[in-house]
Amino acid sequence: MVLVLDFGSQYTRLIARRLRELRAFSLILPGTAPLEEVLRHNPQALILSGGPNSVFDPHAPRPDPRVLRLGLPTLGICYGMQLLAQELGGKVERAGRAEYGKALLTRHTGPLFRGLEGEVQVWMSHQDAVTELPPGWRVSGETEENPVAAMEAPDGKTFAVQFHPEVAHTPKGMQMLENFLELAGVRRDWTPEHILVEWVRAVRERVGGERVLLALSGGVDSSTLALLLAKAGVDHLAVFVDHGLLRLGEREEVEGALRALGVNLRVVEAKGRFLKALKGVEDPEEKRKIIGRAFVEVFSGVAREEGPFRFLAQGTLYPDVIESAGGHGAAKIKSHHNVGGLPEDLGFELLEPFRLLFKDEVRELALLLGLPDPIRLRHPFPGPGLAVRILGEVTEERLSILRQADDLFTSLLREWGLYGQVAQALAVLTPLRSVGVAGDERKYGYVLALRAVTTEDFMTADWARLPLEFLDEVARRITRRVPEIGRVVYDITSKPPATIEWE
């Protein structure tokens, strides 16, 4: 267990992910967590994250001083380095010149940098700098701009760096983190096989002989959870609501795969109900509310028909927990409701086996459990389905048009070997109609927007630089096979300022 104390850095979640990629279990706590909360997790090591504050700010978050006196192996990153220096008797001052972006360690020494030779590229983002080391500490890294870019304590297990080893712009950062784990003596047994054994055992112990109800969306999280329940041998019912807003062939694919793997599945046909409720509605937020209400009504009805159930299983992930909780110096990003806000009077106990896992870890579990790759590696899909990828009113005709176009886009991504290179790809049907030519006649057709992004955490995203030849083939194939579409455009807006979805 490595505890990451979060002081508001945009990279805190990335630190925890990097540690898990190195097979070390990690959790995030607010940087101000009291000693009692830290000890409850029995950590083997601590990492103090960066953050947007200055140590000179009287309201800046600070660690419980007792935590730093535990003697645990500790790594301070950026703001975390400045906190260590200040708390342990060193001196921090406003830097003569801020250091942002790429920098080079012109000198580095000590066990944290074992295996690294020559100049090392790192990523800096700071205005304050350590100008006087705590007693007994020594400089272990410097750049042209910063003579104290890294430092280490005399105990041989406490280190601090002014740069961010967790980001891709520090190419050797993973080696530094791995060196820290080895120096700290952290166990590296956080493997998919270990997770599966532990999670199956935990689910069996928690559930016993009680019944479990699962709302199945068809995405990787809920599908993997359904397989875990089947693997654990618990009495469960997975409910898949076909609201008519799914991608082409999605219902058949999910149903066939999960039934074959032992999931007790009930599919509810509710297409007419949802489309009737959406008739004439154009506002995206109103669409979401209508779909959420209709889902709750359908799911609640099934729960009462098939019940009683003691547990409601949800595919809540660790990022959902982090975003819902927020922290000192970090914003509460959203409240997480995995199944559309089910009413409390259903009386379930929540069962959330994945609440400590990241998405990539769930995908690894899915592989072990036998979930087919088309579902396991599928791109994220919004809860309201294609309803929020149709700008304006949702109709049978528009759903059919978008469903075909979306399938052609994703199929071509797979044909060209590009599907796994983008984090999310989607097609959006706009209400615009554009003039074109069919034969010798003028023709008006829908404008279809394509979007593909690359991202590590979906908090920020960049538009994918897909080959022009690929985009040309996509546009030609879609306009040939879906005659209602007259023009195809490609969205080249990053997040921010845009979001990944259009609605």
Image (tube, rainbow, N blue to C red):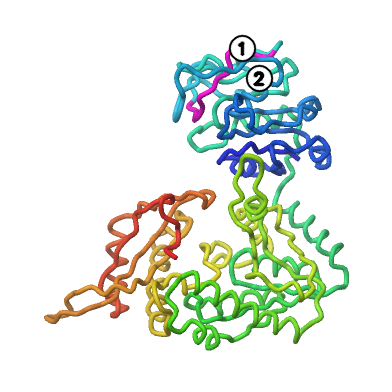
Magenta portion: prevailing SS class: strand
In the rendered structure, which amino acid carries the disc numbered 2? Ala
**Side (left or right) of 203 relative to 118:** right
- Is 242 part of what is drawn in magenta? no
Chain-order first, disc 1 or disc 2: 2
**Viewer-proximal residue among 155 and 12:** 12
Q: Is residue 117 above or below residue 422?
A: above
Give the quadrant of the N terminus: top right
Is disc 1 in contact with disc 2, using a CB cutoff of under 8 Å?
A: yes
Farthest residue, direction front: 58
**Viewer-proximal residue among 87 and 486:** 87
- Cα separation, mark 1 vs mark 2, equals 8 Å
In the rendered structure, which amino acid carries the disc numbered 1? Glu
Residue under the image location 52 percent in, 67 percent down: 382
**Side (left or right) of 391 relative to 302:** left
SS type, badge 2: helix
Where in the figure is residue 370, as x and y percent of width and height? 65, 66
Instruction: Residue under label 1, please give it.
Output: 132
**Viewer-proximal residue among 404 and 68:** 68
**Side (left or right) of 287 relative to 356:** left
Q: Quadrant of residue 162?
A: top right
The residue range painted magenta reads 121-134
